[in-house]
């Protein structure tokens, strides 16, 4: 093995929180889906909005070992993601969960769960209203998929907004 830097955030506030290897572009090689926003930025400078440095990126593999980084969405507390065809259009979408401690940035609206639907080469952001969580329950209740998650112990009690990591398993 050799060490190779694929991306250097150049800030201590980047907060890498999750990495998943997935063939995002369907070319047969593994790309990297990375979340950053570990919710440990209690010392974030006042002039930096956390969504400017936290979020989800894809490092696309060219097949020769080189990667190109694309920032897909900026959202504070981005913690974990999984890829799944949420809208059943044949394209993999991204389900992203965020750990957002209300006391950390009380003036910023919380978005603990969002879906990034693939639209050609773009991604459409859909913030999931935690009062209308039946969108996610639909995934669970299809009988084809199983949603497995774990909660963040520091998040407020109850509901899916405590979800810190999720996996969608499709039975064979």
Image (cartoon, helix red, strand yellow):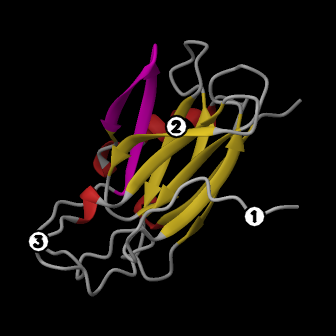
Question: Dots 2 and 1: beta carbons under 8 Å?
Answer: no
Name the residue beneath numbered marker 2: 94
When the figure is inspected, residue 38 is found, relative to residue 91, above or below; the finding is below
Helix, strand or loop under label 1: loop
Name the residue beneath numbered marker 3: 47
- Residue 132 location (% of width, % of height): 32, 42
Q: Per the image, is 123 magenta?
A: yes
Helix, strand or loop under label 2: strand
**Image side of residue 154 versus residue 90, left or right:** left
Give the CA distance from mark 1 to mark 3: 34 Å
**Image side of residue 29 versus residue 93, left or right:** right
**Image side of residue 59 versus residue 21, left or right:** left
Q: Within 10 Å of the Cα at label 1, are there few (<14), some (14-19), or many (20+) other Cα atoms? A: few
Q: Looking at the image, is mark 1 or mark 3 nearer the viewer?
A: 1
On the image, which quarter does residue 82 sit in? top right
When the figure is inspected, residue 82 is found, relative to residue 153, above or below; the finding is above
Segment colored magenta? 112-126
Q: Where, quadrant-wise, is the N terminus in this rendering?
A: bottom right
Give the CA distance from mark 2 to mark 1: 29 Å
In the rendered image, is residue 46 in sight? yes
- Residue 133 location (% of width, % of height): 39, 44
Question: Dots 1 and 3: beta carbons under 8 Å?
Answer: no
On the image, which quarter does residue 107 sit in? bottom left
Point out which mark residue 116 bears.
Answer: none
Give the CA distance from mark 2 to mark 3: 30 Å
When the figure is inspected, residue 80 is found, relative to residue 102, above or below; the finding is above
């Amino acid at each position: 093995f050799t060490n190779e830097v694929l991306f250097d955030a150049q800030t201590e506030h980047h907060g890498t929180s999750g990495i998943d290897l997935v063939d995002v572009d369907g070319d047969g090689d593994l790309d990297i889906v990375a979340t950053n926003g570990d919710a440990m930025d209690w010392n974030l400078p006042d002039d930096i909005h956390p969504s400017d440095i936290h979020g989800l990126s894809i490092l696309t593999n060219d097949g020769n070992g080189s990667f190109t980084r694309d920032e897909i969405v900026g959202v504070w507390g981005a913690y974990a993601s999984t890829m799944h065809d949420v809208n059943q259009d044949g394209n993999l979408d991204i389900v992203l969960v965020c750990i957002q401690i209300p006391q950390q940035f009380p003036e910023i609206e919380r978005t603990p769960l969002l879906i990034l639907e693939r639209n050609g080469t773009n991604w459409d952001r859909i913030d999931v209203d935690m009062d209308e969580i039946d969108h996610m329950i639909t995934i669970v209740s299809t009988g084809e998929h199983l949603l497995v998650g774990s909660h963040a112990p520091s998040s407020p009690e109850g509901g899916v907004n405590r979800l810190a990591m999720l996996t969608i398993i499709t039975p064979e």
